[in-house]
Amino acid sequence: MLAPTQLLGLWRLQRRLVDRIPGRSGRVDGMLELTGHEDEVRWSERGLLTWGDEQLRVTRELRICRDDDESGWLVCFEDGRLFHPWHPGVPVVHECAADTYRGVIDVDPTWTRLRVLWDVTGPDKQQRLYTRCARVLTPVEAAALAARRKHAGQPSSTSST
């Protein structure tokens, strides 16, 4: 199984959101940064949501941690609540009050592209969220860029959003 630690780095994020009940759609363009170590990975999204005529800065933070017996990984919300198991290529389900989230995370064999698909159903929800990410920098490349910027007197952040 692919460990989330193998995906560390900076990723370009594009998400399409479709709300099927009113028939509206929107998109998020931004960055995903995966940072961490052998037991935990931080999934940090930053972007711009375009929904109709509105634009709004958005963020999302998740944690991917080893489960208690260290045989697998769990995706958790920032506050520690369980979201779903980390099983790329395998469908997962998350029950959230009256809504059901059915999804899958896929990673290409070169670990340079990933996609996340969620179908959300419930009494007031009929949504599809489709996220595509392309790797921009590996951790080694990000560290080298930060060192070059520091040497040149530029800010060391690798994120543009």
Image (spheres, rainbow, N blue to C red):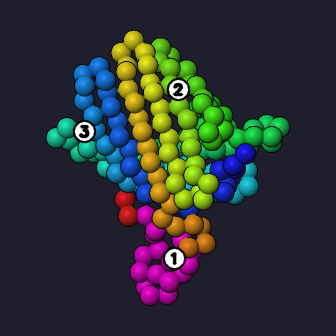
**Mark with earlier residue (1, 2):** 2
Check if residue 11 falls in the magenta segment.
no
Q: Position of residue 36 (x, y in %)?
A: 64, 57
**Which mark lies nearer to you, 1 or 2?**
2
Q: Residue at x 71, y 41 (%)?
A: 73
Q: Residue at x 46, y 69 (%)?
A: 157
The 10 Å Cα crowd at callout 2, few under 14, some 14 to 19, many 20 or more, is some
| Mark 3 in CB contact with mark 1 (< 8 angstroms) | no
| Mark 1 in CB contact with mark 2 (< 8 angstroms) | no
Residue at numbered disc 1: 146
Could you tell me the amino acid type at mark 2?
Arg
Q: Is residue 29 above or below residue 95?
A: below
Task: Magenta stretch: give its range.
Answer: 142-159
Query: Quick one: which residue is furthest to the bottom in this view?
Result: 152
Q: Position of residue 152 (x, y in %)?
A: 44, 87
Separation of residues labelled 3 and 2 (CA atoms): 23 Å
**Mark with earlier residue (3, 1):** 3
**Which mark lies nearer to you, 3 or 2?**
2
The 10 Å Cα crowd at callout 1, few under 14, some 14 to 19, many 20 or more, is some
Asked which secondary structure carries label 3, the reply is strand
> Which disc, if any, is residue 102?
2
**Which mark lies nearer to you, 3 or 1?**
3
Query: Quick one: which residue is furthest to the top in this view?
Result: 123
> Which disc, if any, is residue 51?
3
How many marks the image carries: the answer is: 3
Between 21 and 150, the one lying in front of the other is: 21
Asked which secondary structure carries label 1, the reply is helix
> Split into 4 quadrants, where in the image is the C terminus?
bottom left
